[in-house]
Amino acid sequence: MQISEDKNGDVLTVGLKGRLDAATSKTVEEFLLKKIDAGEKKLVLDLSGLDYISSVGLRVFMMAAKRLKVVQGKIVVCALSTPIKQVFEIAGFTNLFPMFDTRDAAATGVK
Protein backbone atom coordinates (compact mmCIF):
# COMPACT_ATOMS: atom_id res chain seq x y z
CA MET A 1 0.00 0.00 0.00
CA GLN A 2 1.32 3.40 -0.99
CA ILE A 3 -0.06 6.50 0.70
CA SER A 4 0.45 9.97 -0.75
CA GLU A 5 -0.77 13.31 0.49
CA ASP A 6 -1.32 16.72 -1.04
CA LYS A 7 -2.40 19.78 0.90
CA ASN A 8 -4.22 22.54 -0.97
CA GLY A 9 -5.45 25.29 1.33
CA ASP A 10 -7.46 23.62 4.08
CA VAL A 11 -8.14 20.44 2.07
CA LEU A 12 -5.93 17.38 2.51
CA THR A 13 -6.06 14.89 -0.36
CA VAL A 14 -4.84 11.40 0.48
CA GLY A 15 -4.09 9.04 -2.38
CA LEU A 16 -4.19 5.29 -1.80
CA LYS A 17 -2.50 2.87 -4.18
CA GLY A 18 -2.62 -0.91 -3.92
CA ARG A 19 -4.81 -3.17 -1.77
CA LEU A 20 -6.65 -2.02 1.33
CA ASP A 21 -7.16 -5.24 3.28
CA ALA A 22 -6.31 -6.83 6.61
CA ALA A 23 -2.59 -6.59 5.88
CA THR A 24 -2.59 -2.84 5.11
CA SER A 25 -5.62 -1.41 6.91
CA LYS A 26 -3.83 -0.68 10.20
CA THR A 27 -1.23 1.48 8.43
CA VAL A 28 -3.89 3.47 6.58
CA GLU A 29 -6.04 3.84 9.69
CA GLU A 30 -3.12 5.14 11.75
CA PHE A 31 -2.16 7.57 8.97
CA LEU A 32 -5.69 9.01 8.61
CA LEU A 33 -6.42 9.25 12.34
CA LYS A 34 -3.05 10.92 12.96
CA LYS A 35 -3.87 13.56 10.32
CA ILE A 36 -7.34 14.16 11.79
CA ASP A 37 -5.94 14.36 15.33
CA ALA A 38 -3.40 16.91 14.05
CA GLY A 39 -6.25 19.19 12.96
CA GLU A 40 -7.23 18.15 9.44
CA LYS A 41 -10.98 18.62 8.95
CA LYS A 42 -11.47 18.43 5.18
CA LEU A 43 -10.31 15.13 3.73
CA VAL A 44 -10.44 13.90 0.15
CA LEU A 45 -9.61 10.24 -0.44
CA ASP A 46 -8.36 9.70 -3.98
CA LEU A 47 -9.00 6.01 -4.65
CA SER A 48 -7.89 5.99 -8.29
CA GLY A 49 -4.95 3.72 -7.41
CA LEU A 50 -6.93 1.36 -5.18
CA ASP A 51 -7.00 -2.15 -6.66
CA TYR A 52 -8.99 -3.88 -3.93
CA ILE A 53 -10.82 -3.07 -0.70
CA SER A 54 -12.03 -5.54 1.91
CA SER A 55 -14.57 -5.05 4.68
CA VAL A 56 -11.65 -4.28 6.99
CA GLY A 57 -10.62 -1.54 4.57
CA LEU A 58 -14.13 -0.11 4.57
CA ARG A 59 -13.97 -0.03 8.36
CA VAL A 60 -10.93 2.26 8.14
CA PHE A 61 -13.00 4.81 6.22
CA MET A 62 -15.79 4.55 8.80
CA MET A 63 -13.32 5.17 11.63
CA ALA A 64 -12.00 8.28 9.88
CA ALA A 65 -15.54 9.54 9.18
CA LYS A 66 -16.57 9.09 12.82
CA ARG A 67 -13.47 10.91 14.06
CA LEU A 68 -14.13 13.77 11.62
CA LYS A 69 -17.77 14.03 12.68
CA VAL A 70 -16.67 14.77 16.25
CA VAL A 71 -14.68 17.81 15.04
CA GLN A 72 -17.31 18.90 12.46
CA GLY A 73 -15.09 17.73 9.62
CA LYS A 74 -15.97 16.13 6.30
CA ILE A 75 -14.61 13.27 4.21
CA VAL A 76 -15.31 12.57 0.54
CA VAL A 77 -13.98 10.04 -1.96
CA CYS A 78 -13.06 10.43 -5.61
CA ALA A 79 -11.89 8.54 -8.67
CA LEU A 80 -13.30 5.14 -7.72
CA SER A 81 -12.82 2.38 -10.25
CA THR A 82 -15.91 0.38 -11.18
CA PRO A 83 -15.04 -2.59 -8.90
CA ILE A 84 -14.34 -0.32 -5.91
CA LYS A 85 -17.53 1.66 -6.56
CA GLN A 86 -19.49 -1.61 -6.61
CA VAL A 87 -18.08 -2.55 -3.18
CA PHE A 88 -19.14 0.86 -1.85
CA GLU A 89 -22.63 0.37 -3.30
CA ILE A 90 -23.05 -3.15 -1.89
CA ALA A 91 -21.85 -2.00 1.55
CA GLY A 92 -24.19 1.01 1.51
CA PHE A 93 -21.28 3.45 1.64
CA THR A 94 -22.61 5.55 -1.26
CA ASN A 95 -25.01 7.13 1.24
CA LEU A 96 -22.25 7.80 3.77
CA PHE A 97 -19.45 9.14 1.57
CA PRO A 98 -20.04 11.75 -1.13
CA MET A 99 -18.40 10.49 -4.34
CA PHE A 100 -16.79 12.58 -7.05
CA ASP A 101 -15.17 11.72 -10.37
CA THR A 102 -12.09 13.95 -9.96
CA ARG A 103 -9.86 15.40 -7.25
CA ASP A 104 -10.89 18.92 -8.20
CA ALA A 105 -14.60 18.14 -7.89
CA ALA A 106 -13.99 16.38 -4.57
CA ALA A 107 -11.97 19.32 -3.23
CA THR A 108 -14.89 21.62 -4.06
CA GLY A 109 -17.40 19.16 -2.60
CA VAL A 110 -15.61 18.82 0.72
CA LYS A 111 -15.82 22.56 1.46
Image (cartoon, helix red, strand yellow):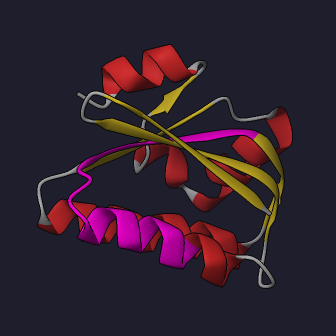
Residue shown at the point (81%, 84%) measured from the top left: 23
Residue 111, image quadrant: top left
x, y percent for residue 95: 43, 45
**Residue 11 lies in magenta, yes or no?**
no
Task: Give the residues drawn in magenta, as a range.
Answer: 29-48
Residue shown at the point (20%, 59%) measured from the top left: 39
**Is 51 rendered above or below residue 60?**
above
Q: Nearer the viewer, residue 9 or 51?
A: 9
Residue shown at the point (66%, 70%) measured from the top left: 57
Using residue 105 as the reference point, say whether residue 42 is left or right of it: left
Using residue 71 as the reference point, say whether residue 110 is left or right of it: right
Residue 108, image quadrant: top left
Residue 38, image quadrant: bottom left
x, y percent for residue 49: 80, 41
**Is 30 rendered above or below residue 83?**
below
**Is 77 rendered above or below residue 17?**
above
Q: Say how many tags the image has.
A: 0
x, y percent for residue 7: 40, 36
Residue shown at the point (54%, 22%) measured from the top left: 103
Using residue 73 as the reference point, say whether residue 54 is left or right of it: right
